[in-house]
Image: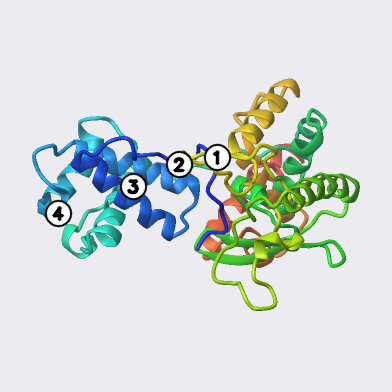
Amino acid sequence: MSDESPQSGAYTDFSASSSPASNLMRLVQRHMRESHLRPTTERTYSSQIRRFVEAHPEASPSDLSAAEVCGYVRTLGEAHGATPASQSAALNAVLYLYREVLGRDLRAETGFERSEIPARLPTVLTRKEVISILEQLTGEHHLMACLLYGSGLQVTECLSIRVKDLDTKDGTLLVRNAKGQKDRLTILPKSIPTALSVQLGRSRLLFEADRRLDRPPVWVPGTTSSKNQPEPGKQWGWQWLFPQERLGSSSDGDLRPRVHVAEDGLQRAVKQAISRAGVAKKASCQTLRHSFATHLLEASYDIRIVQELLGHSDVRATQIYLQLVKLQGITVRSPLDE
């Protein structure tokens, strides 16, 4: 279950039509909401499933054979030039449709061989480049970027931080329901107390205004209500570190619970900062996480520690950064330089 609230405008709305395809998509949407998928996952699945359904206008998905499903995904690559990653995303979405909505597990039936995704080394910034980028950011975007690099976070992990996830005394940050539906602890940079305090103050003002005006509580994952704590979403600890200032509203005009800020604002700010800093590398928010891992390995931290901080289930996913360390000449010197 993902610790991710529904973002205003982040989900696809299929309520306007009553066609069979739209009826199916509403059912898919309901299942995804109940499963608390991340908004980005829901958008991807919705898009891919609708594309799959529209590709078979004369047949219901429940009537299609495993071979037809397999052929559809394969055609994406052969006829439409989809990348292996896109083919994999389409397959995952279609398998979700059959498994979760139609009650039919196609994995054993399809025997579909995913196209091999070429292994590419991620882009990594130097420490000087990281500093130059951070210097171009201000306010909450600066703090977010500091957490991406300083704690090794994914964008969604950063934006969905709750107040109770922060432990400034021990210098740790709890990352909730990250990839693989697991929680993990990572480090909280000691160099951000002032910026963090300012951001907590901003969040507190919105929290107090919501409580004073009796607005809807923030969404809380799982069943955490009790007699002593009937509404956890009204407690300070469950509030977002980066709440969205504007409240969304439903189609009938009712206010929705406050959500955290959307991804695109941070991604756009970091892209602009990279440009202003004069960094020529093709970098993004994810590059800051890659740089976190590589710089820790350069500092001789054990790879198992880095693996835990990143939340990798397999150390092989972390080992790719060792190649970057070597390629940058940190552990190997060319004999010509001797």
Camera-side residue: 186 or 259? Answer: 259
For mark 3, what is the residue? 88
Residue 125 position, x and y percent, is 69, 37
Measured in 3D between alpha carbons, the distance from the residue under mark 4 to the one under mark 2, in whole angstroms, is 25 Å
> Which residue appears at 49% of the width and 51% of the height?
38
Measured in 3D between alpha carbons, the distance from the residue under mark 4 to the one under mark 3, in whole angstroms, is 21 Å
> Which kind of residue does numbered mark 2 sit on?
Tyr
Q: Are marks 4 and 2 in contact (CB under 8 Å)?
A: no
Q: Badge 2: few (under 14), some or many (20 or more) residues near its Cα, within 10 Å?
A: some
For mark 4, what is the residue? 62
Image vertical order of residue 96 relative to residue 273, above or below: below
SS label for mark 3: helix
SS label for mark 1: loop
Camera-side residue: 3 or 201? Answer: 201
Q: Are marks 3 and 1 in contact (CB under 8 Å)?
A: no
For mark 1, what is the residue? 249
Measured in 3D between alpha carbons, the distance from the residue under mark 1 to the one under mark 4, in whole angstroms, is 35 Å
For mark 2, what is the residue? 11
